[in-house]
Image (cartoon, rainbow, N blue to C red):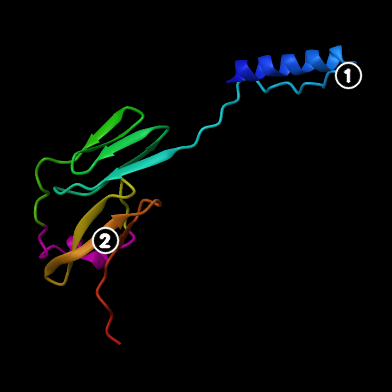
Amino acid sequence: MKQYLGVLAAFVVSTLTACGGTAPAEAPEPLGQESSALVSCSTACSTGPSLSCWGNSCSASNNNYVQCDGVYQYCPTTPPPAIDCSWSSEACVNLLDTGCMTPGSRRKCCIGDEPFGNCQCTTNHVWTCTVPDEDP
């Protein structure tokens, strides 16, 4: 495309010069500058948390993998172990605002004695979780 525009510009300049016009001043093109935007991809995994990544290029297949810049993350092949609600560390209120590794990842948590809660890792690397309503 740049070659085509260069040929077209040369033709216009030579035509203007031949007809008595003056050649326009060309602005130099900055060297070595390239712009690119990051893209993100994510996939749902039936056997575990969703997967996501950022990169210059990406692709994903639900319940299979996510790939960014040639690096693949695969969904686990076995479901995660059931959580034990007898441990206080599994309570949603105790996980809330604690550290996590992978933004976008999800995990179950306990509300009372039941594993009905969910947590998601935020971009600030802390868990945000469903918590039980407080009594008025």
Tags 2 and 1 touching, CB below 8 Å:
no
Of residue 17 and residue 48, the one placed in the foreground of this image is 17
> Viewer-proximal residue, 60 or 19?
19
Secondary structure under tag 2 reads helix
Q: Is residue 74 above or below residue 95?
A: above
Q: Which residue is mark 1?
A: 21
Q: Hey, what amino acid is under mark 1?
A: Gly
Q: Residue at x 76, y 18 (%)?
A: 12
Q: Position of residue 123 (x, y in %)?
A: 39, 51
Looking at the image, which residue is at 23% across and 37% down?
Answer: 65
Give the label, 2 or 1, closer to the camera: 1
| Residue found at x 10% / y 65% | 86
- Residue 86 falls inside the magenta stretch: yes
Q: Could you tell me residue 36's position as x and y percent?
A: 51, 33
Task: Give the vertical position of 64 relative to 84 (above or below).
Answer: above
At label 1, counting other C-alpha atoms closer than 10 Å, the crowd grade (few under 14, some 14-19, many 20 or more) is: few
Can you give x and y, in whole percent of width and height, for residue 41 in the image?
Answer: 34, 41
Q: Which mark is residue 48?
A: none
Q: Quadrant of the C terminus?
A: bottom left
Q: What amino acid is found at the position of numbered circle 2 in the picture?
A: Leu
Q: Which residues are magenta?
A: 83-97
Q: Would residue 20 appear left or right of 40 to someone viewing this image?
A: right
How far, Cα to Cα, is label 2 from label 1? 74 Å
Of marks 2 and 1, which one's residue comes earlier in the chain? 1
Q: Quadrant of the N terminus?
A: top right
Q: Position of residue 49 (x, y in %)?
A: 21, 49
Q: Quadrant of residue 61?
A: top left
Q: Mark 2 highlights which residue?
A: 95
Residue 36 vertical position relative to residue 11 in the rendered view, above or below: below
